[in-house]
Image (cartoon, rainbow, N blue to C red):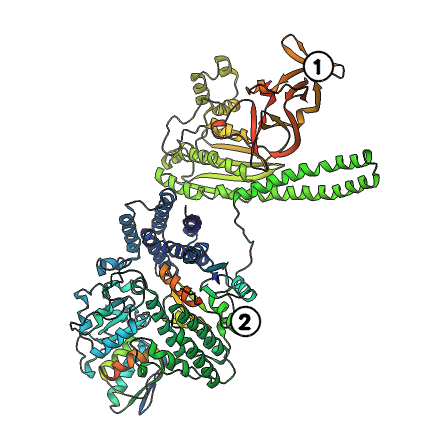
């Protein structure tokens, strides 16, 4: 089982993602509703993948990812950032802080599934 | 920033606003051998862009700004 | 229902409420920026969640999107806020709300929704004064799921005039992604409108092809007017169409959008469709398409500048990410070489080894065209300004949303805890008397004291959790008053005070319907229309005042209007007509008393059951509703001047102590206050006196009643030697109730019986026990 952390302030979105990943199978899903909670959880246990929303209260996705990349225990975790913005600037910013991939909402279910499976190296 | 006009160079830097279009055009007319330096230019108003496209002056080094370099520069050089 | 759908509906309703509330606030205070932003964000979030359910909820997304754009214009000060705007937005909230109701029931939108949605969205956009939704511009070609290989219509003839090289480059950059070709010709006077078309064009996301040219041939330099815009921009972008149309929303009529695919980027030649997606009709992406996209993106990442601080993270995480991807795709032979180049990159401190390794894997990009990577700066790391300030939110009261049933369960458990703790004193007594353990008994009592204290506090806080402010009811009235007063052509101001006053949630819930009825009464029958008010010498604007406050242990709600009041004479006449009072009463009844007659059953003031006031709810229903929870209602009025309705309610729900008894396998409750004692009587001690069974208890005759018979239950089959008798005193006289057995005493929250059990005589209410069973509490006064 691969451990995934979903970080998004909207419960509907977390549920949506959860459903897709549960249907795919092989994922143990955890959730956080803001950057602070996400940061804490990611530093506490070791995840195989983080799916991080950009716009969140308390601490946004960029800041959270930036912090994680500074810590040796989390600097190598595959991180996918998800945002409503598709401007080049936002995509670049995500990569600058250390994301490995960038998806724009709404993410098609099959894309979400495939990217997640690729990112954790799930054996087909 | 205002366009710096000297005898041989017109230097565009940072953001160039519409009000400068007239003076740039006048300078280009009066300095046929002059070089337009866009190296440090980040953005120019469309009016200025027009002047450059229409008047076809001599250009100096390519701009550092990514957008201008990738999309605009080739068209300025070979319209 | 799918929990995701359920969650969406919940959130959507909250967002609608937030929006409506904000809009009403803005009506009186249009410059309130935080509120404007709040309303905008709510619409934005709604659009986002709704988007998860496309294509099913597309109409909802459209309307929300249009609303969002409208609000965006307002907050950018491009559009002034107006009453008309509020109307329009409130209407769209209503539409969405209706749709949510439909979704809750049928789990999908009604058939007309798409047409309605498009129409409504157009209406909203029209208020912006700009071009309608681009779908009309582009034609039916563009919509959901459209990005799958439709040939470009002739609108993009300009594409073929591009150089072959440019097209090829664009094709490589775009790959299998969805593309939009746009041609933007700014108005010649654009600059005079303050526009900078170039600035707009720069914001186009994901440009894969860029071209600009002169619309008319350039004049000679001497005759050139720099301030007449002569530019035409032609761009192909992989960004979402919605974003593109949004970007150009103010110059919509100057831009043409066309959906294209990579097939359109090939120079005209009968080449078969290359590239993974062009021509394919499948909607889903395959693993390898996504994998390719990921690879290409990694190359892009490598080209981005990186300072020393994040350098290692980028490299190592990319290594892990790619290793996993290779694993998943089955390219296991690539894993070891990848590790090698990652290590190499680490030692030479630049990305070149990795880039060289990846580049050939990405189809269609020959090595020489990839951008050079920048060397990481070896200077001290640049401080990241963005890390400085995380978005701080003032920590106001933290709110937790809880399921109501969980609170009820807590309350039940607390009740049981209260009863359970009461056994301890008896235990202490037994310890002393039966086991001669005096010390033990005392210690038990000490601990009982502690537990008792804690339990009482616990009980108080759980009751407190159930307290809700009356604002939860009041908040619907601004909208209600606004809508109805406008509909009736009356000018009415609503004043609310004391909304923070709290009462138990069950009581608040009970208040809801009566208050709506009373306010509607004031709107409909109370306040006169402007001309009547003028004639009466009153200000044209009528006022309805809702006040809530605490008086002792009661909550008082007052609804006061300065309308035409209640005419005692009319009431008397009506009551007499309906046979509710006789002639004598008509003579000597006071005006005050007469007004109270409106609460009499059968009176019903709603003789015109207008669609506004009439649910057929009369004042008598308001009266009984309040009585059921232990409240009262009063009316006072001066004819022609004002009417005041006063609702009095207890603040908390009463906790009743009951004794549990067993009857025919079921449990019933008897209020402890009427219980005198429990006793077991031998059969032989039960005598028949006339038709009545009785026994002698401490020298007095105690009449006995078999509760089974009283409740119409079957007789006890088992002949018992001993009967369990509950001695009660409901009204001064003692009676013994024969039951099957006694159980413990218990604290319960008595709730009125609902549904088909409403008004059943003999029961004063019911309660839910800790184990989920329902307990019926007997009203012995009625039974006996």
Image vertical order of residue A20 relative to residue C344, above or below: above
Q: Which mark is residue C684?
A: 1
Give the chain of mark 2.
Answer: A
Q: Secondary structure at mark 2?
A: loop
The location of residue C194, given as percent across then percent down, is: 30, 69
Q: Is C84 or C319 nearer to us in this picture?
A: C319
Q: Which mark is residue C649?
A: none
Q: Quadrant of the N terminus of chain B?
A: bottom left
Image vertical order of residue C458 relative to residue C737, above or below: below
Task: State whether discs 1 and 2 lie on one chain.
Answer: no
Image vertical order of residue B53 relative to residue C719, above or below: below
Q: Quickly name the residue at label 2.
A: A73
Among the 4 quarters of the image, the one containing residue C365: bottom left
Q: Is C84 or C722 nearer to us in this picture?
A: C722
Q: Quadrant of the C terminus of chain B?
A: bottom left
Among the 4 quarters of the image, the one containing residue C537: top left
Quote the CA–CA distance across marks 1 and 2.
Answer: 83 Å
The location of residue A93, given as percent across then percent down, is: 42, 72
The location of residue A86, given as percent across then percent down, is: 36, 66
Question: Residue at 50% across / 67% down in the picture?
Answer: A64
């Amino acid at each position: 089982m691969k451990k995934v952390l979903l970080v998004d302030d909207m419960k509907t979105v977390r549920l949506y993602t959860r459903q897709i990943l549960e249907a795919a199978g092989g994922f143990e899903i955890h959730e956080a509703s803001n950057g602070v909670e996400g940061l804490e959880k990611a530093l506490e246990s070791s995840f195989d993948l983080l799916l991080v929303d950009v716009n969140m209260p308390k601490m946004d996705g960029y800041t959270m990812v930036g912090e994680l990349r500074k810590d040796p225990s989390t600097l190598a975790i595959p991180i996918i950032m998800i945002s409503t913005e598709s401007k080049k600037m936002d995509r670049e910013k995500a990569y600058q802080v250390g994301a490995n991939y960038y998806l724009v909402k709404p993410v098609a279910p099959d894309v979400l599934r495939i990217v997640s499976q690729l990112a954790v190296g799930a054996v087909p | 920033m205002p366009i710096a006009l000297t005898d041989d160079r017109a230097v565009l830097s940072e953001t160039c606003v519409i009000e400068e279009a007239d003076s740039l055009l006048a300078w280009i007319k009066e300095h046929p051998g002059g070089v337009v330096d866009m190296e440090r230019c980040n953005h120019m108003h469309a009016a200025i862009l027009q002047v450059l496209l229409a008047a076809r002056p001599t250009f100096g080094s390519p701009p550092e700004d990514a957008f201008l370099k990738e999309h605009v520069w080739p068209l300025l050089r070979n319209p | 229902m799918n929990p995701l759908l359920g969650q969406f509906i919940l959130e959507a309703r909250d967002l609608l409420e937030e929006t409506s509330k904000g809009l009403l606030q803005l009506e009186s205070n249009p410059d309130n920026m935080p509120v404007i932003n709040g309303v905008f964000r709510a619409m934005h979030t709604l659009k986002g969640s709704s988007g998860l359910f496309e294509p099913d909820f597309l109409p909802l997304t459209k309307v929300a999107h249009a609303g969002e754009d409208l609000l965006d214009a307002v907050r950018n000060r491009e559009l002034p806020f107006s009453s008309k705007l509020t109307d329009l937005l409130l209407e769209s909230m209503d539409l969405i709300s209706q749709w949510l109701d439909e979704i809750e029931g049928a789990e999908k939108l009604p058939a007309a929704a798409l047409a309605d949605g498009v129409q409504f969205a157009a209406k909203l956009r029209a208020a912006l004064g700009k071009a309608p939704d681009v779908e009309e511009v582009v034609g039916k070609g563009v919509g959901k799921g459209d990005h799958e290989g439709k040939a470009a219509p002739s609108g993009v003839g300009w594409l073929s005039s591009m150089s072959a090289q440019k097209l090829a480059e664009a094709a490589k950059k775009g790959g299998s992604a969805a593309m939009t070709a746009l041609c933007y010709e700014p108005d010649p006077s654009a600059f005079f409108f303050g526009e900078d078309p170039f600035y707009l064009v720069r914001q186009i996301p994901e440009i894969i092809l860029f071209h600009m040219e002169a619309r008319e041939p350039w004049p000679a330099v001497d005759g050139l007017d720099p301030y007449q815009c002569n530019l035409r921009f032609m761009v192909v972008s992989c960004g979402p169409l919605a974003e593109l149309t949004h970007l150009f929303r103010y110059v919509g009529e100057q831009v043409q959008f066309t959906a294209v695919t990579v097939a359109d980027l090939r120079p005209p030649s009968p080449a078969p469709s290359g590239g993974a997606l062009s021509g394919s009709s499948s909607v889903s992406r395959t693993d390898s398409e996504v994998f390719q996209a990921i690879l290409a993106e990694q190359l892009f990442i490598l080209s981005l500048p990186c300072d020393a601080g994040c350098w290692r993270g980028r490299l190592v995480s990319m290594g892990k990410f790619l290793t996993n991807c290779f694993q998943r795709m089955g390219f296991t032979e690539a894993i070891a070489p990848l590790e090698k180049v990652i290590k190499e990159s680490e030692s030479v401190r630049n990305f070149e080894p990795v880039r060289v390794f990846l580049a050939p894997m990405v189809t269609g990009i020959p090595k020489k065209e990839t951008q050079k990577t920048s060397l990481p700066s070896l200077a001290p790391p640049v401080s990241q300004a963005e890390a400085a300030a995380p978005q701080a939110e003032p920590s106001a009261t933290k709110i937790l949303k809880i399921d109501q049933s969980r609170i009820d369960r807590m309350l039940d458990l607390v009740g049981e805890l209260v009863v359970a703790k009461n056994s301890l004193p008896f235990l202490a007594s037994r310890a002393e008397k039966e086991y001669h353990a005096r010390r033990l008994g005392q210690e038990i009592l000490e601990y009982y004291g502690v537990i008792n204290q804690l339990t009482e506090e616990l009980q108080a806080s759980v009751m407190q959790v159930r307290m809700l402010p009356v604002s939860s009811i009041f908040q619907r009235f601004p909208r209600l008053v606004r809508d109805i007063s406008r509909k009736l052509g009356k000018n009415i101001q609503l004043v609310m005070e004391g909304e923070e006053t709290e009462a138990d949630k069950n009581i608040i819930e009970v208040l809801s319907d009566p208050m709506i009825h009373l306010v509607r009464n004031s709107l409909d029958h109370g306040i006169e229309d402007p001309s009547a008010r003028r004639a009466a010498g009153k200000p044209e604007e009528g006022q309805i005042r809702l006040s809530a406050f605490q008086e002792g242990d009661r909550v008082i709600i007052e609804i006061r209007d300065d309308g035409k009041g209640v005419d005692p004479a009319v009431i008397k006449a009506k009551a007499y007509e309906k046979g509710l009072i006789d002639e004598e009463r008509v003579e000597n009844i006071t005006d005050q008393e007469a007004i109270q007659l409106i609460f009499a059953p059968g009176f019903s003031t709603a003789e015109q059951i207008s669609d506004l006031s009439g649910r057929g709810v009369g004042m008598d229903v308001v009266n009984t509703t309040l009585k059921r929870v232990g409240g009262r209602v009063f009316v006072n009025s001066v004819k022609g001047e004002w009417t005041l309705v006063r609702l009095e309610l207890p603040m908390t729900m009463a906790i009743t102590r009951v004794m549990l008894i067993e009857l025919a396998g079921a449990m019933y409750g008897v209020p402890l206050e009427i219980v005198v004692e429990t006793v077991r009587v031998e059969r032989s001690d039960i005598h028949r006196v006339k038709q009545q069974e009785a026994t002698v208890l401490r020298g007095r005759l105690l009449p006995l009643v078999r509760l089974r018979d009283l409740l119409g239950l079957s007789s006890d089959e088992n002949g018992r030697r001993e009967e369990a008798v509950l001695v009660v005193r409901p009204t001064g006289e003692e009676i013994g109730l024969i039951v099957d057995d006694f159980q413990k005493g218990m604290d319960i929250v008595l709730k009125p019986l609902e549904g088909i059990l409403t008004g059943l005589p003999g029961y004063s209410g019911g309660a839910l026990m800790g184990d989920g069973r329902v307990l019926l509490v007997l009203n012995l006064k009625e039974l006996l």
